[in-house]
Structure formats: C-alpha cells, structure tokens
C-alpha cells in the first residue's frame, strides 16, 4: 500500500495525510492542498487509511480515528 | 473471430466515458475516479527496460511540469509487474538522473489494456502498443493516439492537443491545422443561412462564410 508500510506504519505520504487530518483538513481537496500530495493520491490514500482503521469518513469529510491519532 | 475479439478487447471511442478501472500502480492501488476533476493522460508502453520506452518515460517526465500547469495528470501502463516497474524507474533514475514522477499501472492480467483496446495482435499479442488516451475532468475520452512499437511519441503534439482541447472547452471554438497557442482559432460553422450572413459582418477573418477565424 502507498500510505501504509507492510509493517503497519504510515509511509511518508501516509504521515502527511494523517497530519493534515489532525489539522482538521477534512475534504480530499483540503488534504491535497495541505499535504502537497496530488489529489488522486489523497483519494486513494484515504481509502487505505480507512481500510487500516486510521481514518474515518463522515459524509463527505474525513477525520482521524483513535488509532490514527496514536500514530502521529 | 471470437478469439480475435478476446485478444483485442474493447475499442473505446472519442466522446465515450473512459472505462472505469481499479489497478495496482507504482503509487499504490488507483481507480480512474481518483482522477475526477483533473485531465488525465493514460498511456501504455510495450515493456519495461526497453530503449524506446525509456526515452518516452524521460520525455513524459520532461513535459510533466507543463502538464501540471494545465491541470493534467499522467498515468503509465504496461503488462509488466509492479516490481519490474519499480526496478525500471529506479534504473532510469540511477542511469540518467531522471526521477519518474507519475504512477505506472502494472496490468499483469491485461484488464485495463483490454478495456482500452491497447493490445493490437497484429503488432504484438502480449504487449501493449503505444497508446495515448486524453481524458477530460468529466472522465470522457477526448483524444486517442496509437503509435506502433517502433515509433516513440511526440511530446510537443501531446501538449498541443491538451492546449487545443482546453482552448475549445473554454472558448467554444475549434483549432485549425498546425494550431499553436496564440494563433487564430476557427469560429464554429453557421447552422443557418441567416447566421452565415451575420457572421460576415462580425469582423472575423473570413475566407468564405464557412471558414472564419478570430483572435482570442
């Protein structure tokens, strides 16, 4: 996965996205702007973070899960 | 006949929605919908670690900043594995100093290649030919280019097509042969006799009623 290493730790791009979520950036567009990652990477990365239990989706917004917050 | 169809897959056409996909890439698993809102150039190459493809990857990297200015993302594809892609892009960087910035699909099961008609059995039954699909922000195919295995693509032409498509969308005009940004554009032809007569009074540069150009 691009955002999560095989050992379960976030990669550099995964960490950028987690920090953006921690800063309250909740839409893929905001996260892309805040993290400097391309929008397509953010959209795919959010899927991975949710799958790994590190982020949650509420309607069109995303936020850190408790597990995600522990990794920052 | 059926066998030939299986080898070729679907042949997409200009104006159709781009076939959806989810694929393993060098930047993780990506879906076509991840690119919604951006222009996308999806291009295929025959194989990793081959000479023409290497020159093309370097050339695509060289125009990447210009594409980014125009809101265009790049996505490569071949039927090689992701490990092969990773080894090749690392080798390109090691040998030439060029870091490939865009993702590359590892289409081992040919799912995307067949959905986009990228395999032309007359050229090769196992490799993709050099295809270029220019897909707009609404994920509609706007341009399709096919090059044979032996001919590397022309990046100037790809940039020129992007400029022409974006100019058309912004200004509701067409672009003439060999058009370049800054050149005059073609005013769409009139649909009625009245419109044809009116347009001759509008100050366009007209060769005749059906061929009028204007500056933007």
Image (spheres, coloured by chain):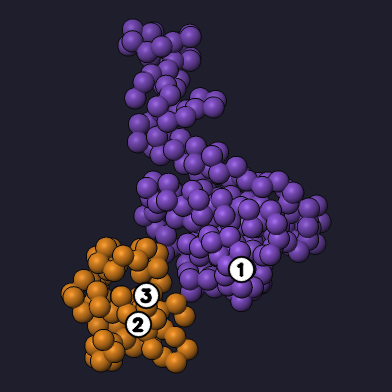
Chain colours: A orange, B purple
Q: Would you place residue B163 above or below residue A33 in this image?
A: above
Residue at mark 2 shares a chain with residue at mark 3: yes
The residue wearing badge 3 is A13
The residue sitting at 42% across, 17% down in the picture is: B213
The residue wearing badge 1 is B91
Residue at mark 3 shares a chain with residue at mark 1: no
Q: Can the viewer see residue B65 in this picture?
A: yes
Mark 2 vs mark 3, foreground winner is 3
Image quadrant where residue B81 sits: bottom right
Chain at numbered mark 3: A
Mark 1 vs mark 2, foreground winner is 1
Q: CA distance from mark 1 to mark 2?
A: 33 Å
Question: Pointer 2: residues within 10 angstroms few (<14), some, or many (20+)?
Answer: some
Q: CA distance from mark 2 to mark 3?
A: 15 Å
Percent across and percent down for residue A49 are: 36, 81
Residue at mark 1 shares a chain with residue at mark 2: no
Question: Pointer 3: residues within 10 angstroms few (<14), some, or many (20+)?
Answer: some
Q: Position of B216 compared to B56: left or right?
A: left
Chain at numbered mark 1: B
The residue wearing badge 2 is A50
């Amino acid at each position: 996965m691009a955002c999560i290493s095989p050992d379960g730790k976030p990669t550099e791009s995964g960490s950028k996205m987690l920090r953006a979520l921690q800063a309250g950036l909740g839409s893929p567009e905001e996260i892309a702007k805040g993290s400097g990652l391309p929008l397509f990477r953010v959209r795919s990365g959010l899927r991975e973070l949710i799958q790994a239990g590190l982020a949650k989706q509420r309607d069109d917004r995303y936020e850190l899960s408790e597990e995600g917050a522990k990794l920052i | 006949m059926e066998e030939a169809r299986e080898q070729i897959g679907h042949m997409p056409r200009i104006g159709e929605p781009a076939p959806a996909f989810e694929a393993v890439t060098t930047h993780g698993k990506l879906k076509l919908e991840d690119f919604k809102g951006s222009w996308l150039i999806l291009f295929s190459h025959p194989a990793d670690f081959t000479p023409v493809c290497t020159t093309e990857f370097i050339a695509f990297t060289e125009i990447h900043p210009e594409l980014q200015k125009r809101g265009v993302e790049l996505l490569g594809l071949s039927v090689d594995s992701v490990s092969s892609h990773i080894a090749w892009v690392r080798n390109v960087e090691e040998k030439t100093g060029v870091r490939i910035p865009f993702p590359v699909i590892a289409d081992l099961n040919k799912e995307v290649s067949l959905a986009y008609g990228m395999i032309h059995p007359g050229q090769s039954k196992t490799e993709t030919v050099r295809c270029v699909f220019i897909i707009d922000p609404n994920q509609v195919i706007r341009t399709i280019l096919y090059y044979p295995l032996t001919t590397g693509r022309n990046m100037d032409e790809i940039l020129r097509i992007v400029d022409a498509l974006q100019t058309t969308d912004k200004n509701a005009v067409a672009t003439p042969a060999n058009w370049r940004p800054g050149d005059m554009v073609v005013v769409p032809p009139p649909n009625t006799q009245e419109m044809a007569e009116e347009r001759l009074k509008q100050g366009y540069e007209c060769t005749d009623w059906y061929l009028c150009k204007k500056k933007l």
